[in-house]
Amino acid sequence: MENETVKLPLKIATRVEAELIKQGVIESKPGRFQIAFTEEQLSHITSLEFINPIEGDLSCLTHFKNLTKLEVSTKGDLRYNPDKKLSGISFNDMVVIEGLESLEDLKITNQRNLEFVDLSKLKNLKSLSLTRNPNLQQITGLTTNDSIKSLEIYDCESLEKIVDKKIGNPQTTLSDFICNNRNLESLNLDMLLFPQVIGYNVRNKNYDMNSIDRLKHIKNIKWSESCANRLISISNSQMYDIHQKAKQIVDETCPGFNALDNVISINRWLAENVRYDYNALNLRKETNGKIYSHIGLVAAKDGPMKGALIPSGPTNGPNGLYNALKFKFCVCEGYSRAMQYMCGLKGITTSKVSCIAKEDNTGYVDSSKSIDSPEYMKLPDDGFHSICRVDYQGNGYYYCDPCWNAGCFQANNKSLPYTMLTQNEIKKTHTLCFYERGISSIPFHKPTLNQSKQAVEQRFSNKEM
């Protein structure tokens, strides 16, 4: 019926009412609050923002026929909160978004339950931002969308390859998207996506030179990492430089395609060559967080700055892979991100895992334990740390702590003790975040693991002779 109304969730209705009053579509009525609106009234709404949505909140969007801009975000750190305490959109909410064909600007941030995004119907989309969505695994419809002018994707730890496959047609990749979309003006992507963008082939080590050339002509481009909720960004030339460094390391230390040997070799290289950046941490404390960069360059040989140490590299850089490979100094997340990047160059799937550097006495990741257990509220308040989870050829998940391996190695313990551990093994020294709940693996065959470690160590020793 023409005058039939749509009842909106309270927190959305307040914003819709305020906007319609501002536009003069409805009148302000003191003492009265409107939560139901006609379809004609809702047609005047072109922009909406959902903060801390809960499941089902977005079902009302089917009534906003002219919506062109949508932002969905959840505040706070979801890594150490039980599932039942999380706000966020559901699969059905995402289906609603995917049907909003009028959308031109879509931003989705920090959604724990977001796993798949299908953009195939959003042909008018000009700006897309997907950030801090830890379980986002797949994006479809992106690589064939040539209307997008601005693309931002970073800190989506479960996202692997961005590719579109259709029966009867060749697959299209992120590299194809970069080359073919001449409307693209702004690009801000996770550093881990760089090999995909340039079409890097892990087998023959070739690139798509068209992609590399296209990147030079995009107006605004940067590569980012969100580590410990700190954003690190570098330029395209810096990204290419660090890719070349990573590739050189992998080429020299990982001669074959044995996944176990390569994981051990990468940990071995990091353990020997990368130092923990205590200077950066101390400077951050001394300046109340205003300066947080690598400290290690002598400013001048003569003059008033002689012998002074000055910050260098990107702000917040100690938490990222750039500092780990460029300066060979970083903190725990830098080790993890560097390991991820180099493993990716060998076709090994990894994920960064947030944790606390203490034995797990909480049962956070024990799927047999109720999340109503009081232990969930006993989270340690310090020792925040970062490690890596390795998907070992589809046969199980294993954990590596390249930072602690480095600490042991530089204290003359070269056994790389924190390499390819099961969840039960890593929990003896680490409290894992909730994302790891349900992850399981059988203990690695110790003779095989030790034999591989010995072979890698022998290969490194032979190179040093």
Image (cartoon, rainbow, N blue to C red):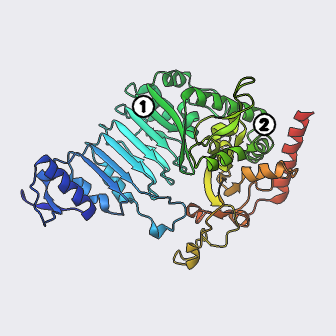
**Disc 1 marks which residue?**
186
Q: Quadrant of the N terminus?
A: bottom left
State the image quarter where residue 353 is shown.
bottom right
Q: Is residue 355 left or right of residue 272?
A: left
Q: Is residue 219 left or right of residue 450?
A: left
Q: Please state which amino acid type lies under the numbered disc 1.
A: Ser
Q: Is residue 18 above or below residue 265?
A: below
Q: Quadrant of the C terminus?
A: top right
Please tell me which residue is depicted at 53% across the width and 32% down the height of the picture.
197
**Which of 173/136 is in front?**
136
**Which of 319/168 is in front?**
319
Q: Please state which amino acid type lies under the numbered disc 2.
A: Thr
Q: Is residue 400 left or right of residue 120?
A: right
Q: Secondary structure at mark 1?
A: strand
Q: Secondary structure at mark 2?
A: helix
Is residue 118 visible from the viewing direction of this image? Answer: yes
Q: Is residue 74 above or below residue 189?
A: below
Q: Is residue 231 left or right of residue 42?
A: right
Question: Of the residues tagged 1 and 2, which is closer to the observer?
Answer: 1
Please tell me which residue is depicted at 39% across the width and 40% down the height of the picture.
128
Q: Residue furthest left?
A: 2
The answer to whether the residues at label 1 and label 2 have Cβ atoms under 8 Å apart is no
State the image quarter where residue 196 is shown.
top right
Is residue 170 visible from the viewing direction of this image? Answer: no
Location of residue 233 in the rendering, given as x and y in whole percent from the top left corner: 54, 37
**Disc 2 marks which residue?**
253
Please tell me which residue is depicted at 17% across the width and 61% down the height of the picture.
6
How many other residues sit within 10 Å of disc 1, few (<14), some (14-19) or many (≥20)?
A: some
Location of residue 298 in the rendering, given as x and y in whole percent from the top left corner: 72, 30
Location of residue 321 in the rendering, given as x and y in whole percent from the top left corner: 64, 40
Choose the circle earlier in sequence order: 1 or 2.
1
Q: What's the CA distance linking mark 1 and mark 2?
A: 36 Å
